Image (cartoon, grey):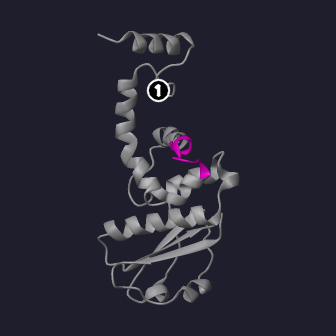
Amino acid sequence: MRSPKLRSTLSTRRAGGEQPFPDYPSNARSFIALDTRLLPYWHMLFDLCPVLLKLDPPEGVGLFRAFMVWAYRHQPAQDWTFHISFCRWLLQSGYAPQVKAAHVESLLSAAAARWINSDPSEAQGILLACSAFPMTTVEWKEGNAVGSDADIQVLPPARFDFAWSPLGRGGIGSFRRWLRIHD
């Protein structure tokens, strides 16, 4: 049995129009189940790219929800290009005016790291380029770093919004051409 004090507190709150959890819909169980299923995507974005939280402090919930609505409609690949898809969306979203080079660099690095951990090919490294923020990221499979960042300066510019190139044992010198990263 509830105490009279607790009962009057609950009545007062509800009478004033205040709900116990105003951010959640009345069918909170399905909302929690939805959030639970989306949690891996949140971690995939914000654990690897915590700088993204600065776009929508403190937890990036608005940013994440807006992206997931887009992702539901467009079904981006869930491989290493997932972060590129997020970056592509981000640069066309309402958050675009706030996007800085650090955000793009973080997403390119996350994509490269996922490529490193999942690529079964003979390639030893990957180059990623973004034309919206002229930058190139290079990552190597464990123990295979060859060349220097200065070598990147001699590469031709990528003709696509996002491009990549696998690298062989010759390091940056093994660059052949830019390949488009598809939507």
Residue positioned most to the right: 97
Magenta-tinted stretch: 55-64
> Residue 105's spot in the image, x, y percent?
56, 67
Label 1 crowd bin: few (<14), some (14–19), many (20+), radius 10 Å: few
**Which residue does the numbered mark 1 point to in the structure image?**
24
For the point 52% across and 41% down, the residue is 70
Q: Is residue 14 above or below residue 156?
A: above
Q: Is residue 134 above or below residue 170?
A: above
> Residue 58's spot in the image, x, y percent?
55, 47
Q: Is residue 60 magenta?
A: yes
As rendered, which of 171 and 148 lies closer to the eye? 148
Q: Is residue 41 above or below residue 147?
A: above
> Residue 32's spot in the image, x, y percent?
37, 31
**Quadrant where the N terminus is found in the figure:** top left
For the point 49% across and 77% down, the residue is 138
Evaluate whether residue 180 shows in this view: no
Evaluate whether residue 149 shows in this view: yes
Q: Residue type at mark 1? A: Tyr
As rendered, which of 21 and 153 lies closer to the eye? 21
Look at the numbered disc 1 and give the secondary structure of its residue: loop
- Left or right of 57? Residue 119 is left
For the point 47% across and 26% down, the residue is 24
Q: Is residue 167 magenta?
A: no
> Residue 40's spot in the image, x, y percent?
36, 48
- Left or right of 33? Residue 139 is right
